[in-house]
Amino acid sequence: MLLAGCWQSEADKADEAASIAAALEEYLPVLGEAYAGGDIETLRPYTAEKELARIQALVQNLVDQGRYLAPEFHSLTIEGTHTWNNSNAFVSTLEVWTVRMHALGSGEMLAEDVEESYRVKYQLKRDQNGWRVLFRAIQE
């Protein structure tokens, strides 16, 4: 027995994937800027509180080490999506970034990875404003 609302057409799935891709395309440059500038408040419209706190801890850890990241987002490829209840999604991506590590104060570049590809897993939640990042993890 099929329950009403559980079935999605291929067109609906494509629309859902497109809305997720658009949300991530908007989010990722802001994420890079938040790391570079240390102002994670710019991420508030895109992330859940728990993810915001996780990012703040990562930024603070770098500051405690006398460093900061300056990531530059280049591109995103959605490799897979799984949505349910029209409000939750797991997403796998391939992202291309240039990531530079700098010393606090002097700004000296300590390390650089140019146009590196990263596989990333997301958990997203839809709210009245669109998709929010509940969790983001780079895969090793």
Image (cartoon, helix red, strand yellow):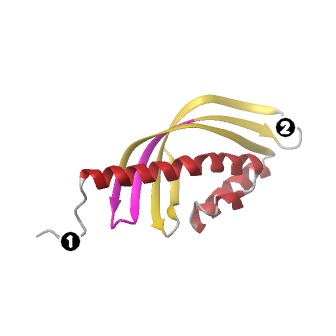
SS at badge 2: loop
The reply to whether discs 1 and 2 touch (Cβ–Cβ < 8 Å) is no
Is the residue 64 above or below the residue 52 in the image? above
Residue ranking furthest to the left: 1
Amino acid type indicated by mark 2: Gly
Q: Is residue 85 magenta?
A: yes
Is the residue 101 above or below the residue 63 in the image? above
Count of numbered tags: 2
In the image, 102 versus 44, the foreground residue is 44
Residue 126 position, x and y percent, is 45, 65
- Can you identify the residue that label 1 sits on? 4
Residue 59 position, x and y percent, is 71, 53
Q: In the rendered view, does 36 fall on the left or right side of 82?
A: right
- Can you identify the residue that label 2 sits on? 107
Badge 1: residue crowd in 10 Å (few <14, some 14–19, many ≥20): few
Which quarter of the image is occupied by the N terminus? Answer: bottom left
Q: In the rendered view, does 18 fall on the left or right side of 43?
A: left
User: What residue is at 46 percent from the left and 64 percent from the top?
Assistant: 125
Q: Main secondary structure of the magenta part?
A: strand
Residue 83 position, x and y percent, is 34, 58
Q: Nearer the viewer, mark 1 or mark 2?
A: 1
The mark found on residue 58 in the picture is: none
In the image, 65 versus 36, the foreground residue is 36
Q: In the rendered view, does 96 fall on the left or right side of 67?
A: left
User: What residue is at 25 percent from the left and 51 percent from the top?
Assistant: 10
Q: Which residues are magenta?
A: 82-96
Residue 81 position, x and y percent, is 36, 50
